[in-house]
Amino acid sequence: MADPWFESVAEAQRRAKKRLPKGVYGALVAGSERGLTLEDNLAAFAELGFAPHVAGLANERQMGVTVMGQALSMPVLLSPTGVQAVHPDGEVAVARAAAARGVAMGLSSFASKPIEEVVAANRQTFFQMYWIGTREEMLARMERARRAGAAGLIATLDWSFAYGRDWGSPFIPEKIDVEAVRRYAPQVALKPRWLWDFAKTKKLPDLTVPNMVATPGDPAPTFFGAYGMWNASPMPTWEDVAWLREQWDGPFMLKGVMRVDDAKRAVDAGVTAISVSNHGGNNLDGTPASIRALPAVADAVGDQIEVLLDGGIRRGGDVAKALALGAKAVMIGRAYLWGLAANGQAGVENVLDLLRDGLGSAMVGLGRPKVSDLSPDDLVVPPGFERQLGNVAVDSALRATSPSHRRREA
Ligand SMILES: Cc1cc2nc3c(=O)[nH]c(=O)nc-3n(C[C@H](O)[C@H](O)[C@H](O)COP(=O)(O)O)c2cc1C
């Protein structure tokens, strides 16, 4: 048998492509419309260079960092991803890998495993919520997460229901029924190892989202059923964000912030952390790479809240670049999903090890013994690289007209 260990995230992706049915692989590639943002998330990291030293380097690699109250062995978290059918152990395997490597994970509302099982595997789990349904329904989901022992809450609001990919969207069935089997059979027949993984468990992926119900074990909606509820929900206001934050007694992250003015509003809403993110290129196509928006956001609010970044991290050097430009830590999405698809829990651990080693090499080369020492001086940033989203001059005017601001001023 070939060595299950892989030496790069790119290799994990190749193995995932080989192993997964075409539709499941396509759902992980994701991206929207032309794929501009998806590409820019990767291209932007390639534009950034390093400025290494030649002597006086340190052997130490102090990577520990505290994010949302959790001590982590390195500045990397596993971002919440609502995907199904990648591996039978799904998010539980991800949680075990995260715990084995001392990092935190976000668990998506659209995940395939119940939060109770995931927290049992890794106490450093943050529950991620979208704005779906009524306030009462959201409170009930939050209460379940609290009872399960979630260490924090992540609110993800950067979703605008854009659809249609120039390269074609994968067929994702509502549930595994006769029609799904008929349409999936040809792709699945070509992927015996994936099928065997599920066959061993005597269960097919059921494509439900168990964390959308208030009580563990209650009948859960399907992925598409929950998506429909989301689409029908009113879009949240900044007052809603502040309300949601108030309901959660603990660390709270707003994920998906790209603009300086929004970052300031997030501070006003009382968040603990934000992730500068464009949902991995899955939201509005044409949004710049998150790493381009990071410096301006970190400058504006980095001394008030924790600023993280996600989007396009594929190697340890990318982690070093994000930290040098102002992130306290990064979150990864596809990188660990490729690892999960390639080799289950061990594959996710493999990816985390690659990021740790790569970050370590960057720290040695740059002569930085601690991650907190990384700075823009360590990088070659080409002219015009950064994008400041959200006009700061207009910002104060906008804030003055927002309902929550007026109420506070009154
Ligand atoms: C297949 C897929 C599903 C995702 N599902 C969610 C989700 O349910 N909730 C969420 O907050 N973000 C979700 N994301 C976004 C990730 O949390 C993260 O922002 C993104 O993947 C980072 O970019 P990267 O994949 O380049 O690392 C998803 C991303 C992918 C690729």
Image (cartoon, helix red, strand yellow):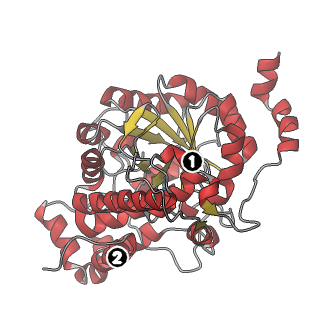
Are discs 1 and 2 less than 8 Å apart at CB? no
Task: Name the residue located 60 percent from the left edge and 34 percent from the top edge.
Answer: 305
Task: Name the residue located 64 percent from the left edge and 72 percent from the top edge.
Answer: 36
Residue 327, disc: 1
Q: What percent of the width, then of the height, locates residue 155?
A: 53, 40
Residue 11, disc: 2
Q: Earlier in the sequence, mark 1 or mark 2?
A: 2
- Residue 396 appears in view: yes
Q: What percent of the width, then of the height, locates residue 410?
A: 83, 15
Which residue occupies the foreground of this view, 123 or 330? 330
Q: CA distance from mark 1 to mark 2?
A: 27 Å
Between circles 1 and 2, the one closer to the viewer is 1
Name above or below for residue 95 compared with residue 41: above
Q: Quadrant of residue 350?
A: bottom left
Report the side of 82 relative to 247 (left or right): left
Quarter that holds the N terminus = bottom left
Q: Quadrant of residue 206?
A: bottom left
- Residue 258 appears in view: no
Which residue occupies the foreground of this view, 224 or 380? 380
